[in-house]
Amino acid sequence: MAKTKEMKEILITGGAGFIGSHVVRLFVTKYPACRVVNLDKLTYAGNLANLKDIEDMPNYRFVRGDIVDGDFVQQLFRDHQFDGVIHLAAESHVDRSISNPMEFVFTNVIGTVNLLNAARHCWGDSPQGKLFYHVSTDEVYGSLGKEGIFTEETRYDPHSPYSASKASSDHFVRAYHDTYGLPVVISNCSNNYGSFQFPEKLLPLFINNIRYNKPLPVYGKGENVRDWLWVEDHARAIDLIFHRGRVGETYNIGGHNEWRNIDLIRLMCRIMDRKLDRTPGTSEKLITFVKDRAGHDLRYAIDSSKLQRDLGWTPSVQFEEGLEKTIDWYLSHEEWLNNVTSGDYLRYYEEQYGKR
Ligand code: NAD
Ligand code: DAU
């Protein structure tokens, strides 16, 4: 069990991304005696504006670097005395993994193994009190039919290059525990939503498109089901697991909040009509059914009862409330949204969805 309150220095990777920025903020503000080093390459998905409010905190430091560069990672571990690692850095978007799988192999697999090697060498034969926390996804479990739920015992069955790369990284993390005795813990979480999410993912993409009256590209018939969790509830779960989780264990994290894409999209359209003072039904007209995502998993649903039972975690935000807050956040952060939807984003958008 890691005692983070006693940890002097921890490394958080991918802290400039969506979930990572919420985790960094939580740790920097909640544990002032612990130095937090945020290692991030600042890919298209990494954005230091996500951390503007805490960047001057004395216990926070940002390091720009690539986890694929093994020498750099080893040097970083020599320069610091990390007691713990929370590893979130990843290529995270399924559609990008379909068009460019190798980036996912480099960052998600090789990058993770580089971090494991560095932690192992740094912590040596007495890693007591240290912890390598690997943040993973429910997508490693594959796809459910109409029934069923993913537990920690569900067999891995990834279908996209993204989920295959995450599954591979999970296997490496467990292998380093079993082979070298590295103290590790893994969590597998469902779809997160909230502020600072890059607008390639369903919610911020559709909020932005509705704002500009652009088509809403629904894959297939919109019948796929996802289990949505408020991102700050995920960050709280990570904090709990990091402090009190059992070494070698896996914890599932989910919202018990399943939505068919099309139902969620219609709900968003209704809320957006109200917020933008549009005639009811206006935004729904933007819904456009497009070619399905290749290998599109039908349904995810997470059983998080182990985390609830063992560590007392429950989601705190009701979905309708969280969705309203999320929409309000994007509508009131026009500058943030405009900054991340210029340049490369336009190229990506055209490649993914065609000229519109
Ligand atoms: P994100 O794409 O928003 O952020 C990823 C961050 O990693 C970015 O800041 C990026 O710059 C950084 N990064 C990418 N490649 C890097 C490299 N080679 N070296 C250093 N930094 C690099 O992702 P997210 O949605 O915040 O997801 C974070 C983690 O949580 C990922 O591991 C993802 O698999 C996992 N996860 C995400 C969700 C979700 O719904 N978004 C759900 C479950 C698990
Ligand atoms: O389940 C956890 C995973 O959730 C994380 O591991 C991933 O990093 C994260 O990206 C997310 O993956 P999804 O593929 O579920 O999320 P995305 O927002 O891309 O898509 C959600 C659903 O909406 C999915 O069924 C595909 C659909 N969709 C998505 C986009 C971008 C559309 O219909 N149209 C779109 O344009």
Image: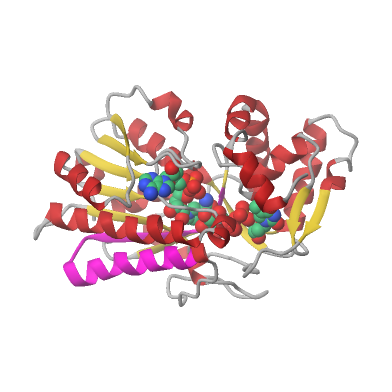
Kindly identify the residue that appears in the image at 21 percent across and 42 percent down.
76
The residue furthest top is 56
Kindly identify the residue that appears in the image at 59 percent across and 66 percent down.
300
Q: Which residues are magenta?
A: 163-192
The answer to whether residue 239 is above or below residue 138 is: above
Q: Quadrant of the N terminus?
A: bottom left
Q: Is residue 110 left or right of residue 143?
A: left
Magenta stretch: includes residue 122: no
The residue furthest bottom is 155
Image position, residue 204 (x, y; %): 64, 42
The answer to whether residue 111 is above or below residue 280 is: below
The answer to whether residue 135 is above or below residue 235 is: below
Res. 85 visible in picture = yes
Q: In front: 132, or 335?
A: 335
Q: Quadrant of residue 26?
A: top left
Q: Is residue 271 left or right of residue 97?
A: right
Res. 256 visible in picture = no
Image position, residue 338 (x, y; %): 63, 29
Kindly identify the residue that appears in the image at 82 percent across and 36 percent down.
273
Q: In front: 233, or 332?
A: 332
Q: Quadrant of the C terminus?
A: top right
The residue furthest left is 125
Q: In front: 209, or 68?
A: 68
